[in-house]
């Protein structure tokens, strides 16, 4: 169903007079965010409907809350968003708010560019030198494998915790809930410090029969090295967050899928492994990608226990050379490079697990990036 | 239509089946047999327990009381030292292999193509060699008219096509008995026919099946026997011409009167 929404001109902040009529996609029950196509007289521009606080929207309540719509979901056949060209000059006059803002942004960008190019504290030569320095690269490698180790613990542990929470056993479910409560309820930095100082709490670690004879025993300090403390701190904390992601993913698979599998003679375990879990992956992958990117940056926390990952490696250098800013820029650049690579990888994994999801071919990477950029510009 | 199959050991025997959900007793003593090659249609008003009956047969719901035998084997239980013992989950799963089920909502596996949907259970459950299963699956997809859609995902298929894949998926296990729970109720009227035709072809080939349906024309045309259920009991049972045309029970008459319109529509369609 397509409803019609008229925007009246008395908006306080934006001149809506030229926005004309807004066609809203009000398909009830649809989970897709509604998009709003604004057909102005001179240009066709897509925009999110102004928040109800502008007091001008006369749409039904269900349409009042419109999340940042994905530009890819524009109904086909409508005119597409495009950059302003020669013939659009009159728009300058018609949309003073937008063009003022654009001017401000451009000026700020120019100032930033000028600062980056001419700042004396930002010695690009120094940045270039340390960017490929052996010690810094070793720190980068440590950051990467710390991320990989912690995410592995997080994903495996999170899956186990999610299964425990979904299990029929009240004890297992409660244990998982308690774990999540504790690890989400205390700061990660405190947890890392705790693991680093665990020897003060448990001086010796023994393997044997619980409350019975001991087989192997060792001092905690020898066993829990700085790397182990960092991995445990990051990984066990991550498991608490991952478990909620995995649980939500499993629960979003329709129970009738399990039923159909059961009717075909599959056991619960087989149905879970072959039918439910692969479909849950579609819901699990995107937030896991985000968690991985957070983890990459989160590893910098372990610099507090003197583990020479990327951040601590640059700190070691600037403590000596006092080139603080260039070295922090080196760290930032490396984090950005890895984050970008991870984002691209995430896209391909998502596309793999999203197969069978829709009638259309999934959007290409460039299409998605473009759509995302425009969403950001417009929101 | 072929005559009634010979009276031998029934494929399905249901004896005094009861099912209650909490306080509500949904099935209150249901008994009947289905013989090899027989097509049984179950009709009745909404909430009369038709779906529950089918789901009890393959133990998707565990019956509260009563026994079910499939090809002489008791479902869900085993007699041990003169007492009934519940089967383990894996044993129960192996019993379900003999019963194919087609749901109202298709329930195809969304992450698998049509062909993968069909071969999944024979390979993973029956451990049959992939090459053989693929040959069988291709033949089955061809039989339901979807050989050209083998590599499409369910989301790329129409409702009628999805339901036909679901039928092929159930047949790939070579079940002794097929259960259809309102297989066309979720479909647009104009594509109901393509699914009913597939089921009718199976009936002609001698597949033993129980079909819960509201398509009275189909029931009259294809089934050997019709059961009318109401409030958890079988009210009337007999050849379609008796139950659907000259019902002896007043509740059956009332039910049929309420759905008169579908009889003429589906009846015209069933003769094709
Ligand atoms: N899991 C359940 N828990 C509680 N009650 C249930 C459950 N499943 C079914 N029922 C109840 O059992 C009764 C019979 O349901 P059933 O689905 O078997 O009816 P039906 O004859 O198939 O109806 P329809 O034609 O609408 O499909 C209904 O009153 C329903 O509410
Ligand atoms: Mg039903």
Image (tube, rainbow, N blue to C red):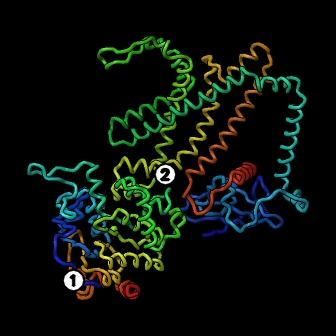
Mark 2 Cα-neighbour bin, 10 Å: few <14, some 14–19, many ≥20? many
x and y, in percent, of residue B193 in the image: 43, 80
Q: Is residue B136 left or right of residue B1?
A: right
Residue B120, by quadrant, is bottom left
Q: Is residue A305 above or below residue A236?
A: above
What residue is pinned by disc 2? A279
x and y, in percent, of residue A328 in the image: 75, 25
What residue is pinned by disc 1? B250
x and y, in percent, of residue A361 in the image: 63, 60
Q: Is residue B22 above or below residue B106?
A: above
Quadrant location, ligand no. 2 = bottom left
Q: Would you say the residues marked 2 and 1 are in contact, meaning their CB atoms lie under 8 Å apart?
A: no
Q: Does the image show residue A375? A: no
Label 2 to label 1: alpha-carbon separation: 49 Å
Q: What residue appears at the point 61 percent right and 62 percent down from the top-left corner?
A: A360
Q: Is residue B218 left or right of residue A305?
A: left
Q: What residue appears at the point 33 percent right and 43 percent down from the top-left corner?
A: A168
Check the residue under mark 2 and report the chain it is in: A
Residue A105, by quadrant, is top right
Q: Is residue B92 above or below residue B247?
A: above
Tell me the mark number nearer the camera, choosing from 2 and 1: 2
Q: Is residue B160 left or right of residue A103?
A: left
x and y, in percent, of residue B188 in the image: 47, 76
Is A94 in front, or is A26?
Answer: A26
Q: What residue appears at the point 28 percent right and 54 percent down from the top-left corner?
A: B94
Q: Is residue A84 left or right of residue B170?
A: right
Q: What residue appears at the point 63 percent right and 25 percent down from the top-left corner?
A: A142
As helix, strand or loop, the secondary structure at mark 2 comes to: helix
As helix, strand or loop, the secondary structure at mark 1 comes to: helix
Could you tell me which quadrant the N terminus of chain B lies in? Answer: bottom left
């Amino acid at each position: 169903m397509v409803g019609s929404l008229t925007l009246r001109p008395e908006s306080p902040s934006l001149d809506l007079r030229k926005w004309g009529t807004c066609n809203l996609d009000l398909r009830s029950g649809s989970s897709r965010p509604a998009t709003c196509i604004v057909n102005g007289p001179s240009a066709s521009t897509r925009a999110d409907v102004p928040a109800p606080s502008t007091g001008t929207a006369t749409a039904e309540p269900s349409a009042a809350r419109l999340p940042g719509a994905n530009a890819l979901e524009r109904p086909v056949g409508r005119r597409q968003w495009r950059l302003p060209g020669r013939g659009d000059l009159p728009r300058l006059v018609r949309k003073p708010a937008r063009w003022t803002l654009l001017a401000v942004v451009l000026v700020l960008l120019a100032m930033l560019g000028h600062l980056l190019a001419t700042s004396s504290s930002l010695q690009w030569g120094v940045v270039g030198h340390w960017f490929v320095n052996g010690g810094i690269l070793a720190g980068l490698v440590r950051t990467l494998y710390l991320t990989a180790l912690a995410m592995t613990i997080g994903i495996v542990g999170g899956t186990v915790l999610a299964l425990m929470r979904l299990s029929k056993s009240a004890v297992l479910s409660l244990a998982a809930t308690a774990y999540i409560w504790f690890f989400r309820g205390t700061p990660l930095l405190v947890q890392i410090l705790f693991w680093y100082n665990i020897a003060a709490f448990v001086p010796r670690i023994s393997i044997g029969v619980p409350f019975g004879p001991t087989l192997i025993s060792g001092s905690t300090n020898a066993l829990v090295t700085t790397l182990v403390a960092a991995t445990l701190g990051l990984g066990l904390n991550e498991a608490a967050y991952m478990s909620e992601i995995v649980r939500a993913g499993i629960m979003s698979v329709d129970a009738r899928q399990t039923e159909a599998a059961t009717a075909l003679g599959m056991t619960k375990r087989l149905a879970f492994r072959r039918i439910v879990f692969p479909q849950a992956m579609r819901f699990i992958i995107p937030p896991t990608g985000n968690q991985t990117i957070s983890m990459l940056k989160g590893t910098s926390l372990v610099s507090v226990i003197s583990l020479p990952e990327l951040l601590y490696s640059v700190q070691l250098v600037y403590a000596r050379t006092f080139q603080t800013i260039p070295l922090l820029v080196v760290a930032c650049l490396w984090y950005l490079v890895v984050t970008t690579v991870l984002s691209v990888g995430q896209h391909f994994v998502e596309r793999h697990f999203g197969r069978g999801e829709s009638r259309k071919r999934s959007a290409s990477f460039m299409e998605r990036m473009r759509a995302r950029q425009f969403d950001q510009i417009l929101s | 239509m072929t005559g009634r199959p010979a009276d031998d050991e029934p494929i399905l025997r249901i004896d005094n089946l009861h099912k209650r959900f909490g306080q509500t007793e949904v099935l209150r003593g249901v008994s009947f047999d289905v013989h090899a090659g027989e097509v049984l249609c179950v009709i009745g008003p909404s909430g009369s327990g038709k779906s529950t009956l089918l789901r009890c047969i393959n133990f998707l719901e565990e019956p509260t009381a009563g026994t079910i035998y499939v090809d002489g084997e008791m479902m869900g239980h085993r007699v041990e030292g003169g007492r009934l013992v519940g089967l383990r989950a894996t044993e129960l799963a192996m019993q379900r292999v003999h019963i194919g089920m087609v749901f109202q909502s298709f329930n195809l596996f969304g992450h698998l193509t049509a062909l993968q949907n069909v071969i999944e259970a024979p390979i993973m459950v029956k451990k049959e060699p992939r090459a053989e299963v693929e040959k069988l699956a291709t033949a089955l997809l061809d039989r339901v008219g979807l050989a050209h859609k083998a590599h499409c995902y369910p989301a790329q298929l129409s409702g009628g096509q999805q339901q036909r894949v679901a039928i092929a998926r159930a047949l790939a296990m070579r079940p002794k008995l097929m259960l259809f729970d309102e297989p066309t109720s979720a479909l647009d009227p104009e594509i109901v026919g393509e699914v009913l035709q597939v089921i009718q072809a199976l009936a002609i080939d001698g597949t033993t099946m129980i079909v819960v349906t509201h398509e009275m024309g189909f029931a009259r045309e294809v089934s050997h026997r019709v059961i009318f259920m109401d409030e958890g009991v079988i009210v009337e049972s007999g050849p379609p011409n008796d139950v659907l045309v000259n019902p002896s029970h007043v509740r059956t008459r009332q039910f049929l009167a309420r759905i008169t319109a579908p009889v003429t529509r589906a009846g015209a369609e069933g003769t094709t």
